[in-house]
Image (tube, rainbow, N blue to C red):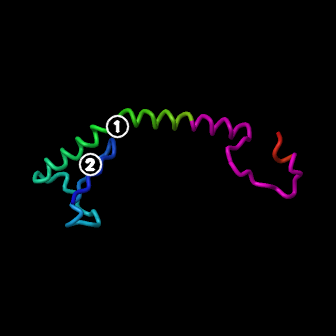
Amino acid sequence: TYKYIYIHGHKDQLFNLDEDPDEWHSLIGDPAYHQTASEMKARILDKFNPDEIHARVMDSYHKRTLIAEAMSRNGTSWDPEPRFDPARNSLDQYLP
């Protein structure tokens, strides 16, 4: 019946999908749904540590940004299917 949305660092949302299937009206501020929202949030936080997830995502982002910048500077690519240029010799275009 209910859908709870938790996005770390943003306001939580709670929807009654029977009455609001398109999720237009969040019930998060309605005191009648405080217990429902609290229980659903507790279930999420019992399984996930949002601060740890955020730290890991940011670490990965910084590593990928550094690698992308280095590859951009030296003209390399991670493309798993390099584009073939028929105007160039195959050895010339794939070997540095």
Query: Could you tell me if the residues under marks 2 and 1 are in contact, i.e. CB atoms within 8 Å?
Result: no
Kindly identify the amino acid type of the residue bearing the numbered disc 2. Asp
| 70 vs 17, nearest the viewer | 17
Q: Quick check: 57 left or right of 90?
A: left
At horizontal 40% and vertical 36% (from top left) the residue drawn is 53
Tell me the magenta residue range: 64-91
At horizontal 68% and vertical 40% (from top left) the residue drawn is 72
Residue 14, image x, y percentages: 23, 54
Q: Is residue 36 magenta?
A: no
Residue sticking out furthest to the right: 89
For the residues carrying marks 2 and 1, which lies nearer the camera in this image?
1
Residue 17, image x, y percentages: 24, 63
| 24 vs 36, nearest the viewer | 36
Q: Is residue 75 magenta?
A: yes
| Residue wearing tag 1 | 50
| Residue wearing tag 2 | 12
Q: Quick check: 39 left or right of 54?
A: left
Secondary structure under badge 2? Answer: loop
Q: Is residue 84 above or below residue 42?
A: below
Q: Report the Cα–Cα distance between label 2 and label 1.
A: 13 Å
Q: Quadrant of residue 67?
A: top right
Disc number for residue 29: none
| 29 vs 49, nearest the viewer | 49
Q: Residues within 10 Å of mark 1 (few under 14, many from 20)?
A: some
Q: Residues within 10 Å of mark 2 (few under 14, many from 20)?
A: some
At horizontal 28% and vertical 39% (from top left) the residue drawn is 45
Kindly identify the amino acid type of the residue bearing the numbered disc 1. Pro
